[in-house]
Image (cartoon, rainbow, N blue to C red):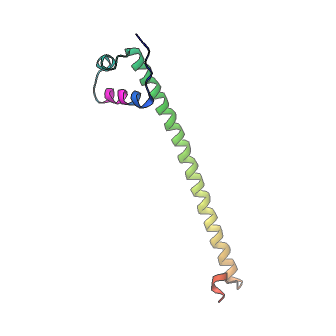
Amino acid sequence: MERKYYTPQEVRMILQELADGQTVEEAARKHRISKATIYRWKKRAERSGAEEMDRLKKVDEENRRLKHLLAEAALEIQALKEQLKQRGWRPADDRE
């Protein structure tokens, strides 16, 4: 059997057919590939999906931390502005 290379889009399309209810045997026959190839693709897709979820969790945690830092900085800036106002300081746009 001659070797054919499938693009990632073609692999996703075939795996989507399986998710939509087509059996592995039907997909293998339709696309002229072995069942072992399909199972290997499924395993790789599951593994990369788990890796993507881990990456997204890390990004979410980083976003949460950065938002917290931003909120603290904004509160600190507001407190400093209030202290300056009490000492008679006016912002540059109010001096006219």
Q: Nearer the viewer, residue 53 or 41?
A: 41
Spot the residue most to the top.
1
Q: Say above or below: 16 vs 2.
A: below
Give how far across and how far down residue 13 sits, in percent.
36, 30
Spot the residue most to the bottom.
96
Q: How many marks?
A: 0
At 28% across and 24% down in the image, what residue appears?
22
Horizontal side, residue 47 vs residue 19: left or right: right
Q: Is residue 15 inside the magenta stretch? A: yes
Horizontal side, residue 60 vs residue 8: left or right: right
Spot the residue most to the front.
2
Q: Nearer the viewer, residue 90 or 87?
A: 90
What span is colored magenta in the figure? 13-19
Spot the residue most to the right.
87
At 58% across and 48% down in the image, what residue appears?
62
Query: Within the image, what quadrant is residue 74 found in?
Result: bottom right
Main secondary structure type of the part rendered in magenta = helix
Give how far across and how far down residue 56 sits, in percent.
51, 42
The C terminus appears in which quarter of the rendering? bottom right
Give how far across and how far down residue 82 sits, in percent.
65, 78
The N terminus appears in which quarter of the rendering? top left
Q: Say above or below: 91 vs 19.
A: below
Q: Say above or below: 54 vs 67.
A: above
Horizontal side, residue 35 vs residue 87: left or right: left
Give how far across and how far down residue 37 sits, in percent.
42, 17
At 33% across and 17% down in the image, what residue appears?
28
Q: Say above or below: 84 vs 57.
A: below
Query: Within the image, what quadrant is residue 95 found in?
Result: bottom right
Q: Is residue 60 inside the magenta stretch? A: no
At 43% across and 18% down in the image, what residue appears?
4
